[in-house]
Amino acid sequence: SGATSVILRDGITRAPCVRMNSAKEAAELKLWCEMPANFATLKHAFESTTGFGKLLSVEPTVAGKNVYLRLQCFAGDAMGMNMVSKGSLAVIDLLKSVFPTLVLVALSGNMCTDKKAAATNWIHGRGKSVVVEAIIPQHVVRTTLKTTVQAIVQTNIHKNLIGSAMAGAIGGFNAHAANNVTAVFLATGQDPAQNVESSNCITLLEETEDGDLWICCTMPSIEVGTVGGGTSLPAQSACLKAIGCKGGGVNPGDNAKQLAHVVAAATMAGGLCFFWGPGG
């Protein structure tokens, strides 16, 4: 019956680093941003810079005099980095009018977090957060993968879960998600450097009551778009058209979400193939 995939969250992030005169002022900025009425003001400033972008949240983190403002933005069918960066500048300009001592240190303060392994992406998500699952009949496991359901389940536990935990992995509870993510990214004109966070994945396997194999991949930070960047290159554009998500969708964001489903499903299929062979 194929795979079932669901988008859990959809929002690209940028986290400017600003510096105040004191830790007290930094705390005041954080508390100000968290007031609903003030967030509405920030949202208006952000959205004045874009026709599609919608500011979803602001999460301020204080470190001494520094404040890292993690802005999450719905970006339609674009991957959204340019969009969220432009909107972030508008937010900073507004905050400067309220807090005159505020100094912008960096538009990206590394709490976004872009192209780097980070727990914040694993926990809070970035881009599209996707969960995908499928049932593989036990006879397919035996005849195609040349192994048993029980062997695959145990191998996944000892390798992908315990082994990765012993290695101190962040988002690396899988066999080789990065291979599959990178392949789809190159074929569809995505930014291959964002494979770092887009490959965050935990693969879970169980034996069903009927003895079949249940497989699931949870991927909290798939960063994809179907407009802009390399998506207009001839080969990549043709690939997007072949999978039914070229350009902007009828509803903004639909095509980018479809591509995220494809990335997750390809990763799950690639993870399953890794277990081919006698005894898993």
Image (cartoon, helix red, strand yellow):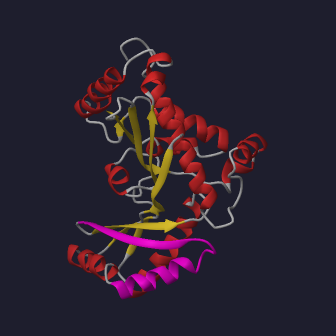
Task: Report x, y in % for residue 79.
Answer: 58, 57
Corner quadrant of residue 39: bottom left
The stretch of residues the image draws in magenta is 36-63
Q: Is residue 113 left or right of residue 251?
A: left
Above or below 184: residue 21: below
Q: Is residue 274 visible?
A: no
Q: Position of residue 104 (x, y in %)?
A: 42, 70
Residue visible at 26% across and 30% down? 167
Tell me if I can see residue 254 in this picture.
yes
Left or right: where 236 falls relative to 195: right
* Magenta span includes 242: no
**Relative to the observer, which residue lies in front, 162 or 38?**
162
Residue 138, quarter of picture: top left
Relative to 182, does residue 28 appear above or below in the rendering? Answer: below
| Residue depicted at x 44% and y 66% | 72
The answer to whether residue 37 is magenta is yes
> Residue at point 39% right, 73% down?
103
